[in-house]
Image: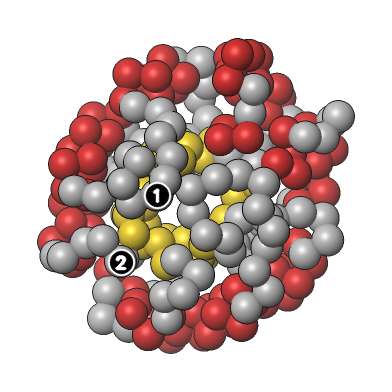
């Protein structure tokens, strides 16, 4: 079923890690739809973040579904590391996977929705032969690795093209945008057909998480 409103997934990359339990509680009370977790290995992107032990503890704090985004090399290894956590969505970068169709089917066979991620420079044409199989396409609207970056405007053109591809090849597939999303560009993203947005700094730097989430929805 396609969502009736724009789904909002706060990225805990921008949360206060010294108060992470409280931050999770606050965004859940603010009625977020998913919790977005960026897993970085220091190789695919120049940053390190959370491992499965920490995420398992976080998942015990909430019933909200987890949206895990793997920014890693050796993708199959990390997929099998995080699948036992039963995330709702597990997304992998199309730039890094040699046997993408096989990996998508493996993720789905474990009861998790499979997402495919495109970096800002990656053409939507790369999706053509795999789009019918995936549950979600995630468009990076910043260069991955760090929070707080500025939205790349060309994402809107790519989003429009992918929505047309999706409607033709796999109407149930969700399209998500991640990076620099805020109240200034959410209307344009909605106009182009986005289903789900990831927002980190915009939510966690606000004084009222619920109000920030509602403004995106």
Give the SS element for disc 1. Answer: loop
Q: In this view, does 59 lie above or below 212?
A: above
Q: Name the residue under label 1.
A: 45
List x then y, in percent, for residue 49: 43, 32
The reply to whether residue 10 is in sight is no
* Residue 204 seen anywhere in this rendered image of the structure: yes
Q: Is residue 6 shown left or right of residue 13?
A: right
Q: Position of residue 133 (x, y in %)?
A: 28, 68
List x then y, in percent, for residue 104.
23, 58
The image quadrant of residue 166 is bottom left
Q: Quadrant of residue 35 in the image?
A: top right
- x%, y% of residue 200? 65, 42
Q: How many marks?
A: 2
Q: Name the residue under label 2.
A: 95
Q: Badge 2: how crowded within 10 Å, few (<14), some, or many (20+)?
A: some
Residue closest to the eye, 139 or 105: 139
Left or right: 17 in relation to 118: right
Residue 49 lies, with reference to residue 42, above or below; the image says above
- Residue toward you, 11 or 129: 11
Q: Residue at x 40, y 28 (%)?
A: 50
**Nearest the eye: 41 or 161:** 41
Q: Which residue occupies 42% across, 75% down?
A: 122
Q: Is residue 148 left or right of residue 121?
A: right
């Amino acid at each position: 079923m396609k969502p009736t409103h724009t789904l909002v997934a706060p990225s805990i990359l921008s949360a206060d890690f010294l108060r992470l339990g409280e931050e999770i509680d606050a965004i859940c009370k603010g009625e977020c739809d998913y919790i977005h977790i960026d897993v970085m290995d220091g190789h695919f992107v120049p940053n390190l973040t959370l491992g499965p032990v920490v995420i398992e503890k976080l998942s015990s704090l909430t019933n909200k579904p987890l949206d895990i985004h793997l920014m890693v090399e050796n993708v199959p290894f990390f997929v099998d590391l995080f699948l036992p956590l039963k995330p709702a969505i597990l997304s992998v970068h199309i730039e890094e996977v040699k046997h993408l169709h096989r990996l998508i089917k493996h993720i789905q066979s474990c009861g998790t929705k499979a997402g495919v991620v495109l970096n800002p420079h990656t053409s939507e044409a790369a999706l053509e032969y795999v789009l019918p199989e995936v549950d979600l396409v995630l468009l990076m609207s910043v260069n991955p690795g760090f929070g707080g970056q500025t939205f790349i405007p060309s994402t809107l053109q790519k989003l429009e093209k992918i929505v047309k591809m999706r409607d033709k090849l796999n109407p149930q597939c969700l399209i998500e945008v991640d990076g620099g999303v805020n109240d200034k560009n959410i209307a344009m993203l909605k106009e182009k057909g986005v289903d789900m947005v990831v927002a980190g700094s915009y939510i966690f730097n606000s004084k009222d998480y619920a109000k920030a989430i509602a403004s995106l929805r």
